[in-house]
Amino acid sequence: MTLATGINLALVLMCLVVMVQAIRMDRRIRALRDGHLDQAVEKLDNATHQARLVLAELKRVLSTDAAAQGEILYAARELRDELSVMVGVGNSVAERIVDAADKARAAEAGVRRRSARWRDEADAVLRAEAETRPAASSPVADEARELSRIVFDLTSKRGNRVA
């Protein structure tokens, strides 16, 4: 076998392969024509049209929703600002209450110290008077002592209420 004969046989083989492929492609093209290609294109066109409608509706909804969300966001910011003012007022009122309670406790402690001091002083004065007087005490002196104790007790209680 010569070189030319080998090349010719290879060429014939390649031509047969090309003919087989051409026959297969022809069958597929005929199947597409017979397989309602027009209907497939029409369905694809309808699907594209529906997609465009959905996208247009989506754009409309998003534009109105974005505006509505912006209004809601603006209202929420206003409420946040108002709430922060209210919290600030509440905090200042709480601080005032705490300060007033501290002052009341300090005043109450001062009144207690003062009333205890006054009571001690009154007791000292009464003891001194009792020592200077004769042992037999009169009912008037006892009554005066009792009245002074009542007065001191009342002033110390009134001081506690005021503080």
Image (cartoon, rainbow, N blue to C red):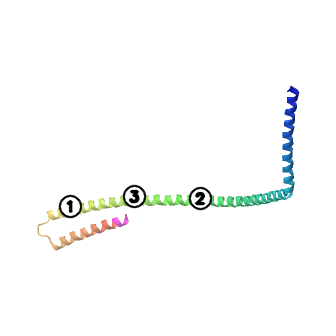
- Nearest to the eye among marks 3 and 2: give it: 2
Percent of width and height locating residue 105: 36, 60
The quarter of the picture where residue 50 lies is: bottom right
Percent of width and height locating residue 151: 27, 69
Give the residue at mark 2.
80
Percent of width and height locating residue 44: 81, 56
Query: The residue tagged with tag 3: helix, strand or loop?
Result: helix
Query: The residue tagged with tag 2: helix, strand or loop?
Result: helix
Mark 1 vs 2, N-terminal side: 2
Residue closest to the far bottom: 139
Residue type indicated by callout 2: Arg
Query: Could you tell me how far apart the alpha carbons at marks 1 and 2 are, in whole angstroms?
Result: 65 Å
- Nearest to the eye among marks 1 and 2: give it: 2
Contact? badges 3 and 2 (CB < 8 Å): no
Residue type indicated by callout 3: Asp
The stretch in magenta equals 159-163
In the foreground, 23 or 6: 6
Mark 3 vs 1, N-terminal side: 3
Residue 80 versus residue 149 in the image, above or below: above
Query: Could you tell me how far apart the alpha carbons at marks 3 and 1 are, in whole angstroms?
Result: 33 Å
Query: The residue tagged with tag 1: helix, strand or loop?
Result: helix
Give the residue at mark 3.
102
Percent of width and height locating residue 88: 53, 58
Residue 73 versus residue 25 in the image, above or below: below
Give the residue at mark 1.
124
Instruction: Name the image quarter holding the N terminus.
Output: top right
Q: In the image, is residue 42 part of the stretch drawn in magenta?
A: no
**Image position of 120 (left or right of 101):** left
Residue 155 versus residue 41 in the image, above or below: below
Instruction: Name the image quarter holding the C terminus.
Output: bottom left
